[in-house]
Amino acid sequence: MDALIKPLRPAKPSDAKPSDAKPSDMRPSEAKIPEGRPAELDPSEFLAAAVRADQPRPSRAEAEHAVETLLSYIGENPGREGLLDTPRRVVEAYDELYQGYHQCPAEVLNRTFGETAGYDDFVLIRGIEFTSQCEHHMMPFYGKAHIAYTPVERVVGLSKLARLTDIFARRLQTQEHLTAQIAAAIDEILKPRGVAVMIEAEHTCMSVRGVAKHGAMTFTSRFTGMFRDNPAEQARFLSMVRGPQR
Ligand SMILES: [Zn+2]
């Protein structure tokens, strides 16, 4: 059975306080009240790389030692032959799975084409596959993201939305936060007329541990701008997302 989590924190325009408006929030082409944004989604916190290059971190040797500790904790002997290289492999896997901390979402979306050539409908990228790690158990959840936005004047290369998804996915996440961050980043950087993001994912912390239910999918969605304000556009987005698979 599908678990359905529907719009998490529907943003209400009335939440927007004038003092929240930074110059970068202002859209040149429209005199619109800046959209309310949940307090935990301050774009300055996630549009840059999450980790500064000079930020002090434990050394690789310390990280490998921590893996040895976990091996001992589960009752293993970290010194046996099959496990000798395991701490190194685990830390290398972490470097890959969590590389999103060192990547900058704003950089990916800043390379835009200026020209919409009169295009005035939304652009939908359906079925962007991703794998992320849940912040509660550090276990994978994976699935597909569907992203639509309606450009005003800035259009982004199609692969960039997949890149953006990967940057946020390669950090510790909740599915709700991942959904909201993708939407907020596109909203903030491209200033489109609206963004719609839907994510469907299976959580291994639910399928292989805990209640151990395989195949349960969690759905999350986030709508801004015209998608939030216009139920007909939401419905059109959802029907295209659920439309016939190729
Ligand atoms: Zn979890």
Image (spheres, rainbow, N blue to C red):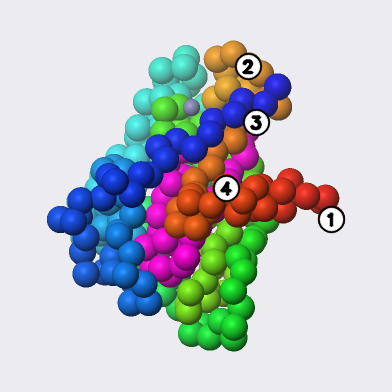
Query: Does the beta carbon at disc 2 come under 8 Å from ligand 1?
Result: no
The N terminus: image quadrant: top right
What secondary structure is found at the residue carrying circle 2?
A: loop
Dot 2 corresponds to which residue? 212
Query: Does the beta carbon at disc 4 come under 8 Å from ligand 1?
Result: no
Which circle's residue, 2 or 3, is located before the other in the chain? 2
The answer to whether any part of residue 130 appears in the image is: no
Is 97 in the magenta?
no
Q: Nearer the viewer, mark 3 or mark 4?
A: 4
Direction from residue 96 to residue 148 in the image, left or right = right
Q: Nearer the viewer, mark 4 or mark 1?
A: 4
Q: Residues in magenta? A: 174-202
Dot 3 corresponds to which residue? 217
Tell me the number on the disc at residue 32: none
Is 230 placed above or below 74 here?
below
Which residue sits at x=54%, y=66%?
A: 150
Using the numbered discs, state the Cα–Cα distance from disc 3 to disc 1 in whole angstroms.
21 Å
Dot 4 corresponds to which residue? 231
Name the amino acid type tagged 1.
Answer: Arg
Which circle's residue, 2 or 4, is located before the other in the chain? 2
Name the amino acid type tagged 4.
Answer: Pro
Q: Nearer the viewer, mark 2 or mark 4?
A: 4
Tell me whether the residue at label 1 lies in contact with that at label 2, contact meaning CB atoms closer than 8 angstroms. Answer: no
Is 44 placed above or below 115 here?
above
Which residue sits at x=62%, y=40%?
A: 200
Using the numbered discs, state the Cα–Cα distance from disc 2 to disc 4 in whole angstroms.
36 Å
Is 45 placed above or below 155 here?
above
Name the amino acid type tagged 2.
Answer: Ala
What secondary structure is found at the residue carrying circle 4?
A: helix
Dot 1 corresponds to which residue? 246
What secondary structure is found at the residue carrying circle 1?
A: loop
Using the numbered discs, state the Cα–Cα distance from disc 3 to disc 4 in whole angstroms.
24 Å
